[in-house]
Image: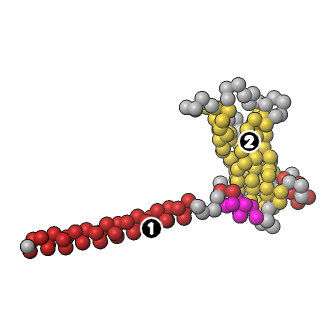
Amino acid sequence: METFLEERERAKSNAKIYLIGALIGVVLIGTAIWLVTGPSMQEQMANILEGSYHEGSPEFEQLTKDIIISTGDNTVESPNAFGTISMFIQGKIRNKGNRVINGLEVNAAVVNQFNDVLKEKRVLVVPTQQARLMPGETIPITLSVDGFSKKDDRANIRWKVTAIRTEN
C-alpha cells in the first residue's frame, strides 16, 4: 500500500514540470509574435525620412542638383535556380553640395532601349549604409534587382533621388 501512494506523489510532481514547461512555451511564442508584428520596413523608412524633401518641392529640386549618382562598371547579371535573372548593380553617390545629408533614398530602375522601366528598386542609402553624406564625399551603393526573364532587354540603369533630408 505504501508504494501505491508514492507513485501518485511522483505523478503530481511531473504535472508541475509540464505546467512550467507549457508556461515557458507560451511566453516564448508570445515574444516571437510580438517581435514579428513590430513596425514594418516601410514604417521604419517613413520614420527615418520624416521631415525630408520629396519630388515637387523647390527645396528638393535645389538639393538634388548637388547629388551625382553614377553606375559602376561591375554590374553583374546572374541566372538563379528559378529560371530568372538577378542583377547586382553597383554605383557611387557623390554629394557635390555644401550641406550634410542625413537622409537619402534613391530609386534604381532597369530600363530597356526605349527607356521603359522593366524593374525598379527603392533603397534607403543614408543612414542605412552610412550615417551621413558629407559635402564632397562619395559613397558606394550596391543593390540587387531580381525577377528578369531571359527575353528582357536590360539596356540601361537609371538612378533617381526620391527623398532627401539635410542637417543644415
Q: Nearer the viewer, residue 11 or 23?
A: 11
Check the picture and name the quadrant holding the N terminus: bottom left
At x 69%, y 60%, the residue is: 43
Residue type for callout 2: Glu
Check the picture and name the quadrant holding the C terminus: bottom right
Q: Earlier in the sequence, mark 2 or mark 1?
A: 1
Query: Where in the figure is residue 35, as x and y percent of width and height?
Result: 54, 62
The answer, for residue 63, to whether it is visible in the render is: no
Which residues, given as a range, are shown in magenta?
Answer: 43-50
Q: Which residue is mark 2?
A: 120
Q: Where is 18 relative to 117, above or below?
A: below
Question: Disc 2 versus disc 1: distance between alpha carbons?
Answer: 41 Å
Numbered tag placed on residue 27 in the rendering: 1
At x 70%, y 25%, the residue is: 151
At x 72%, y 61%, the residue is: 46
Task: For label 1, count other residues whose C-alpha is less than 10 Å away and answer few (under 14), some (14-19) or many (20+).
Answer: few
- Magenta stretch: includes residue 46: yes
Task: For label 2, count other residues whose C-alpha is less than 10 Å away and answer few (under 14), some (14-19) or many (20+).
Answer: some
Q: Quadrant of residue 4?
A: bottom left
- Predominant secondary structure, magenta span: helix
SS at badge 1: helix
Query: Where in the figure is residue 36, as x and y percent of width and height?
Result: 56, 59
Query: Where in the figure is residue 6, as x and y percent of width and height?
Result: 14, 72
Q: Nearer the viewer, mark 2 or mark 1?
A: 1
- Magenta stretch: includes residue 140: no
Q: Quadrant of residue 60?
A: bottom right
Which residue lies most toward the top here? 151
